[in-house]
């Protein structure tokens, strides 16, 4: 496959790598006897869902739009959790879901009468206040978190009509972090487990990362399920699309200021790769080294937006960069397309799939109408 066939900028999903992840996820699912479903908040590239459906049949939604996407393109009803439901969309969400989780007791009491005539299984999100996540922006387990109900609010047991519990406190974590969370759930919410039918352990289980102990994951899930007699559900996002593709960009200009050279590419970190600034996350690239070390040529990589901080600190290269050179950012499929914006009117990168046979399929390009139609 010639790189010239891929436009720039372009998100490219590599089908072979996605299938590799899906095979592992299904192996864990079957071996542990649990349900693993896709979280759209990490990966919602629906042109790839025909591949995903061959291995995994369910998905979780966090909004009406994601519920509708699940119904249409995953061809199933959703496991739905929203931080807060609004009255206008609740009827549609209820209709398109099999499971529905409330973030607070006040929301549950507000909507419970509408759920009585439904076959949807109702759950509550709990906060076990245990997490290995060190970046506050991504940690939902803090004592003052708005996400989930703490143990003091559920001392009297599960309210009538509630069948499940939902906990999401991990982010790209290990099975050993999950083991600590399971212990915290037992310690703080163990009195609820005999009356629950299911426990959703949310996402953050990065089982497709090299070095992840999947045998340990299977062991602890099987043990917890056997001990409590619960249906166990996991809903990772990153694990599905981990290291499954790249973002191709092109150098548009090279700017030098006070001894620092910046190669400006035809993409934007704030618009297209926000985790690079928020996490912060420093992606590897094909053409250079993210740890500059002794590299003879150092370049900051800058985006095309007017945000002053739309750049990454210097990468190392073995040659000078010139206008027209390609910069390929690796592992750019999860939590990228789902978080893009059109700030400054910067166009969304094209989207494509590199098939197993090496052929490139361009699935979507974006233009002025896509920018205009988001506004009014």
Image: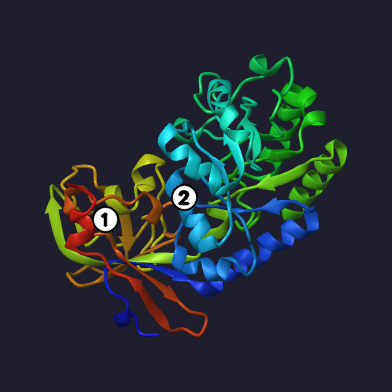
The disc label shown at residue 66, or none: 2
Inspect this view and state whether residue 169 appears.
no
The disc label shown at residue 301, or none: 1
> To which quarter of the image does residue 322 belong?
bottom left
Extreme front residue here? 117
Count of all numbered marks drawn on residues in the image = 2
Task: Say few, some or many: other residues with alpha carbon within 10 Å of mark 2 (under 14 / 14 to 19 / 20 or more).
Answer: many
Q: Position of residue 339 (x, y in %)?
A: 37, 49
Residue at (55, 19) in percent of width and height: 143
Q: Position of residue 176 (x, y in %)?
A: 70, 41
Inspect this view and state whether residue 269 appears.
yes
Task: Say few, some or many: other residues with alpha carbon within 10 Å of mark 1 (under 14 / 14 to 19 / 20 or more).
Answer: many
In screen coordinates, is 203 left or right of 272? right
Q: Which image quarter holds the N terminus?
A: bottom left
**Which one is in front, 93 or 166?**
93
Q: Is residue 223 above or below residue 108?
A: below
Coloration of the structure image: rainbow
Residue at (60, 56) in percent of width and height: 209
In screen coordinates, is 186 left or right of 344? right
Q: Position of residue 4 (x, y in %)?
A: 29, 81
Extreme right residue here? 227
Task: Give the mark nearer the N terminus: 2 vs 1.
Answer: 2
Residue at (49, 24) in percent of width and height: 146
Nearer to us: label 2 or label 1: 2
**Which one is in front, 132 or 258?**
132
As helix, strand or loop, the secondary structure at mark 1 comes to: strand
As helix, strand or loop, the secondary structure at mark 2 comes to: helix
Residue at (74, 49) in percent of width and height: 217
């Amino acid at each position: 496959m010639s790189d010239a066939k891929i436009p720039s900028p372009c998100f490219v999903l590599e089908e072979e790598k996605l299938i590799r992840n899906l095979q592992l996820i299904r192996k864990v699912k079957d071996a542990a006897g649990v349900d693993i479903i896709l979280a759209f908040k990490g990966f919602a590239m629906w042109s790839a869902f025909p591949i995903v459906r061959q291995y995994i049949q369910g998905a979780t939604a966090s909004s009406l739009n994601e519920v509708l996407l699940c119904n249409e393109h995953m061809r199933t009803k959703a496991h739905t959790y929203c931080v807060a439901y609004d009255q206008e969309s609740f009827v549609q969400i209820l209709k398109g879901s099999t499971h529905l989780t409330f973030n607070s007791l006040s929301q549950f009491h507000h909507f419970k009468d509408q759920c009585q005539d439904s076959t949807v299984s109702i759950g509550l999100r709990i906060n076990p206040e245990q997490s290995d996540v060190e970046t506050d922006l991504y940690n939902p387990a803090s004592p003052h978190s708005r996400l989930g109900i703490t143990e003091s609010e559920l001392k009297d047991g599960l309210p009538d009509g509630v069948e499940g519990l939902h906990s999401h406190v991990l982010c790209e974590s290990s099975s050993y972090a999950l083991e600590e969370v399971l212990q915290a759930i037992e310690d703080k919410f163990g009195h609820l487990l005999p009356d629950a039918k299911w426990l959703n352990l949310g996402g953050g289980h990065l089982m497709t990362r090299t070095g992840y102990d999947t045998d340990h994951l299977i062991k602890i899930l099987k043990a917890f399920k056997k001990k409590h007699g619960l249906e166990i559900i996991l809903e990772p996002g990153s694990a599905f699309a981990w290291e499954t593709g790249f973002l191709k960009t092109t150098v548009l200009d090279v700017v030098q200021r006070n001894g620092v050279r910046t190669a400006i590419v035809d993409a934007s970190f704030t618009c297209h790769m926000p985790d690079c600034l928020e996490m912060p996350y420093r992606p590897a690239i094909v053409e250079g080294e993210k740890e500059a070390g002794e590299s003879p040529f150092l370049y900051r990589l800058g985006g095309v937006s007017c945000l002053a901080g739309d750049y990454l600190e210097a990468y190392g290269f073995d040659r000078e960069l010139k206008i027209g050179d390609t910069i390929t950012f690796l592992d750019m499929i999860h939590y990228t397309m789902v978080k893009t914006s059109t700030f400054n009117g910067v166009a969304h990168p094209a989207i494509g799939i590199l098939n197993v046979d090496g052929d490139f399929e361009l699935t979507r390009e974006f233009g002025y109408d896509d920018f205009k139609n988001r506004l009014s």
